[in-house]
Amino acid sequence: MSPSLTVSRIGAQQGSVLRELRTASLREAPYAFGETLEDALLVDPASFDDTATLHANSPRLATFLLYTEGHPAGLVHAYIEEADGARAFVSALWVAPAVRHLRGGELLVNFASQWLAEQGASQVHAWIADENRNAMRFYERLGFGPTGDRRAMPSHEQEAESLYVRHMQPDRDV
């Protein structure tokens, strides 16, 4: 029997879970994120509590957690820019290697995309490290495609990332 996967929005009291998953993601795939493990470890643990509270209650940003058999196994952030013409994004997707074969990443991105659509987004964007070919293929399988926009990665300025977009369909199950 395969383990069951569930996704839920982070709770205000889950700062320690957020910190655990964030540092695990940076240990396992440091090339894929806009921050370094060293930076994350320097952050006051109370800051993760503040972030969890904000992401649990904000109408513009959220973190969704993946659980397998009740244990945290992944996360994704979803947010809407505050500027005019605000774009919606998923970011910081990570799933523990031991459960990747169960399609938890797909579940997280679809859950976050649906939440963004409920907030009024017609498109969902994702910045993907150019060196992370697995992530590019993953997002393409979910209906994302490259926009042609590129930039230097915030934490690794010598490396580039590309912007991908997924067009949401009204009343479509993602």
Image (tube, rainbow, N blue to C red):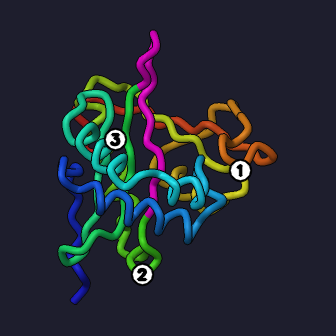
- The quadrant holding residue 164 is top right
Q: Is residue 140 left or right of residue 67?
A: right
> Reading the chain from its start, which is encountered first: label 1 or label 3?
3
* Residue at which label 2 appears: 98
Query: Residue 12: x and y, percent?
Result: 19, 47
Is there a contact, CB below 8 Å, between mark 2 and mark 1?
no
**Which residue is painted at 28% across and 40% down in the image?**
55
* 37, 133: nearer the viewer: 37
Label of residue 130 in the image = 1
Query: Residue 36: x and y, percent?
Result: 61, 55
**Which residue is painted at 30% across and 40% down in the image?**
62
* Residue at which label 3 appears: 113
**Which residue is painted at 23% across and 56% down in the image?**
14
Q: Is residue 52 left or right of residue 158?
A: left
> Reading the chain from its start, which is encountered first: label 3 or label 2?
2
Magenta stretch: give its range. Answer: 81-94
Dot 2 falls on a residue whose secondary structure is helix
* 142, 77: nearer the viewer: 77
CA gap, disc 2 and disc 1: 24 Å
Query: Residue 138: x and y, percent?
Result: 52, 58
Tag 3: amino acid: Ser
Quarter holding the N terminus is bottom left
Let me know if residue 86 is in the magenta part.
yes
- The quadrant holding residue 90 is top left
Tag 1: amino acid: Asp
Q: Is residue 11 left or right of residue 36?
A: left
**Which residue is painted at 45% across and 10% down in the image?**
84
